Image: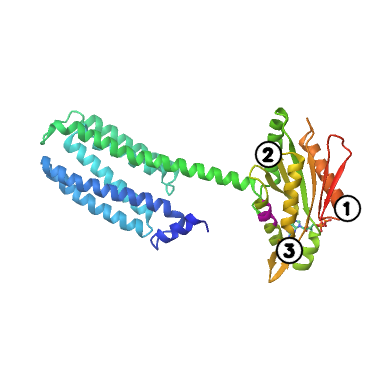
Amino acid sequence: MTAIEVYRLRRKPARVRIENYRKYVVLNITAIAGTLIHTGFIGLFTVIGADTLALFNILSVLVLAVSLWLNRAGMHAAAIYLMCLEIAGHAFLATATLGAAAGFHYYLWPVACVAVINPRMLPRQAAVIGFTLIALFAYLQLRYAALPYGFAYAEYLPLLLFFNVMAAALPLILAVVMVRQINESQERRLTEIANRDELTGLYNRRFGNDFLHQTFAASDRLARNYCIAMGDIDHFKAVNDRYGHEAGDQVLEDIAIALLGGFRRSDCLCRWGGEEFMIAFPDTTRETALAALERFRDRLASHYSRVDGERINVTMSFGLVSVRPGESVEAAIKRADHWLYEAKHQGRNRIVSDVHDTGADVLSHTG
Ligand SMILES: Nc1nc2c(ncn2[C@@H]2O[C@H](COP(=O)(O)OP(=O)(O)OP(=O)(O)O)[C@@H](O)[C@H]2O)c(=O)[nH]1
């Protein structure tokens, strides 16, 4: 469970489901803000002499209190419908009483917006309700535009219009911002899922390949050093055979954690497949990459996985290449694979790297 989920779990009322927490908070804020606004309106309407409206606002406050209770009880859809009904009724009555110049019919816009984004409603149904509410807005505007204002403090009418337009815009903008946030976070999450290996959380082969293709071109253009290492756990089959597949998975996860702690953030760590890993070192000389791999191999020597009280220690072999100018991703990977094979052949637990400028030298680092 993520930290934010733990926080939500602590804060939410018992009957609100964790996946509805965001909805619960937004509805709560809306209902509380609505209650405060309507309480203010009770005073305002009493002062200007619109007693029917003042009485209606007492009813509005009660309706919003019921909505708050429904929201806390987990009945979010019922809370939304009740609030929308209250706002629409109030907009109608206030406009019919004070005229369109007071701007109460503007509250129909956020109600239409909430109706349309409510996921409980079918899209067609939501569209019909949305258009009906906007049609009601247009009707009120046309019908009551010329209604003479017959109450006290007429000079403050423009101020009331300004307040109503701003207050009505607030939930509208909040709703759109919320939808945007949800969209962006879902997009980020989907991209993460598509790019990551499920077991280890490292990047997967598809992402690794894309990364190599993108960074190779830039590196070549700028004549920068670039290294690639292919790594493979030694005798991993024996781990599976002796301790079981689940223990093998545990070892893979622990290796991934060790890899993440062992290299720079700019290096790209991928699970290439099975028990094979690819590390891309952009903007890095062969000597630096070799030193980093050596440090990692040292680290691995004192690194254990614990499975059912047993300590499992594994070693890894690496093939390292410094990318040649103009070399393709596929050719560089093939060479790294070749030196990995050579490392296995020479007895494992070592790093074998090429020296590309001669194409002949082979450095072998053993434990
Ligand atoms: N537990 C687990 N095992 C895996 C996974 N992917 C691949 N393997 C195992 O990794 C083992 C790889 O075995 P081999 O290719 O023979 O290589 P090795 O035993 O590591 O020997 P060398 O590479 O020659 O040192 C196989 O037993 C696979 O089943 C995985 O996701 N989880």
Which one is in front, 257 or 250?
257
* Residue 30 in view here: yes
On screen, 139 above or below 24? Answer: above
Instruction: Kindly check if marks 1 and 2 are in contact, taking CB atoms under 8 A apart as contact.
Output: no
Measured Cα–Cα span from mark 2 to mark 3: 30 Å
The residue that appears at 87% across and 35% down in the rendered structure is: 358
Question: Could you tell me residue 280's position as x and y percent?
Answer: 71, 42
Q: Earlier in the sequence, mark 1 or mark 3?
A: 3
Query: Label 2 belongs to which residue?
Result: 211
Question: Could you tell me residue 81's position as x and y percent?
Answer: 33, 49
Q: Is mark 1 within 8 Å of ligand 1?
A: no
Disc 2 vs disc 3: which is toward the camera?
Answer: 2
What amino acid type is highlighted by mark number 1? Gln
Main SS category, magenta section:
helix
Instruction: Kindly check if marks 2 and 3 are in contact, taking CB atoms under 8 A apart as contact.
Output: no
Neighbor class of circle 2 (other Cα within 10 Å; few <14, some 14-19, many 20+) is: some
Query: Label 3 belongs to which residue?
Result: 245
Which one is in front, 55 or 345?
345
| Quadrant position of the C terminus in the picture | bottom right
Neighbor class of circle 3 (other Cα within 10 Å; few <14, some 14-19, many 20+) is: few
Instruction: Examine the image and state in which quarter residue 162 appears.
Output: top left
Instruction: Examine the image and state in which quarter residue 114 appears.
Output: top left
Q: Is mark 3 within 8 Å of ligand 1?
A: yes
Quick check: which quadrant has ligand 1?
Answer: bottom right
Q: Secondary structure at mark 1?
A: loop
Q: Which residues are magenta?
A: 255-259
Disc 1 vs disc 3: which is toward the camera?
Answer: 1
Q: Secondary structure at mark 3?
A: helix
What amino acid type is highlighted by mark number 3? His
Q: Is residue 357 left or right of residue 61?
A: right
On screen, 363 above or below 297? Answer: above
Give the number of the disc on residue 4: none
